[in-house]
């Protein structure tokens, strides 16, 4: 897997928690998470997919689909900014996305396969970036962000939710 050096990212404060949680190379972290996600998915079964640890919290299935949605959105933003998109990229309402996800028809296998596919796609995308791509800056959710921020945002967001899943859903 690529271990390109990614230049220091420019990012909005709202993503600092995710970005600073990634130690070392973000691409290495993304690659390592492939195995961590696969191991975590082995603990998921039909009986716990609909489990929510508290009233008003998302179910396990909803969290997993949210993680996939977010990676797809962040990867698209990275692509658009790296390719020089000048238009501001819209934000997204994570709750609306989950409410409209049609989750009754999504199986554990589909989620696991989608995770793997999306992550491999993200890694392939980042492997195509050259030095000039990483430093391009665009606007997403009304804030300036560099293409180099997105691997860290994806890895940090995934790390955050894997921790929550382990502590509150898959004890």
Image (cartoon, rainbow, N blue to C red):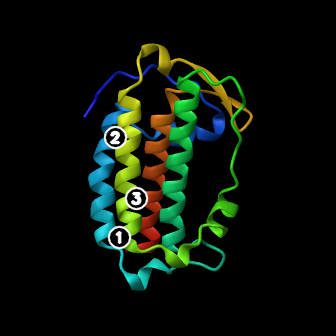
Where does the image place residue 69, in percent across and percent down from the top left? 54, 54
Q: Residue furthest bottom?
A: 47
Q: CA distance from mark 2 to mark 1?
A: 23 Å
Q: Does 78 appear above or below 54?
A: above
- Relative placement, left or right, of 30 versus 97 is left
| Residue where numbered disc 1 is placed | 109
Q: Nearer the viewer, mark 2 or mark 1?
A: 1
Where does the image place residue 30, in percent across and percent down from the top left? 36, 42
Q: Does 32 appear above or below 97?
A: above
| Residue where numbered disc 3 is placed | 114
Q: Secondary structure at mark 1?
A: helix
Q: Secondary structure at mark 2?
A: helix
Q: Quadrant of the N terminus?
A: top left
Mark 1 Cα-neighbour bin, 10 Å: few <14, some 14–19, many ≥20: few
Q: Quadrant of the C terminus?
A: bottom left
Tell me whether circle 2 and circle 3 mark residues in contact (CB < 8 Å): no
Nearest the viewer among 135 and 14 is 135
Where does the image place residue 168, in percent across and percent down from the top left? 46, 71
| Residue where numbered disc 2 is placed | 29
Nearest the viewer among 169 and 138 is 138
In this view of the protein, can residue 58 be seen by the observer?
Answer: yes
């Amino acid at each position: 897997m690529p271990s390109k050096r990614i230049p220091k990212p420019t990012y909005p404060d709202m993503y600092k928690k995710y970005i600073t949680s990634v130690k070392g190379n973000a691409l290495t972290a993304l690659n390592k998470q492939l195995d961590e996600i696969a191991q975590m998915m082995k603990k998921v079964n039909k009986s716990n997919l609909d489990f929510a640890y508290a009233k008003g919290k998302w179910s396990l299935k909803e969290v997993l689909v949210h993680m996939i949605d977010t990676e797809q959105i962040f990867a698209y933003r990275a692509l658009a900014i790296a390719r020089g998109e000048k238009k501001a990229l819209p934000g997204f309402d994570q709750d609306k996305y989950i409410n409209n996800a049609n989750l009754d028809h999504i199986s554990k296998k589909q989620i696991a396969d989608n995770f793997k596919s999306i992550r491999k796609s993200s890694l392939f995308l980042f492997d195509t970036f050259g030095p000039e791509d990483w430093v391009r800056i665009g606007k997403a959710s009304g804030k300036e962000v560099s293409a180099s921020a997105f691997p860290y945002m994806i890895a940090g967001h995934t790390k955050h939710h894997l921790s929550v899943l382990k502590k509150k859903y898959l004890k």
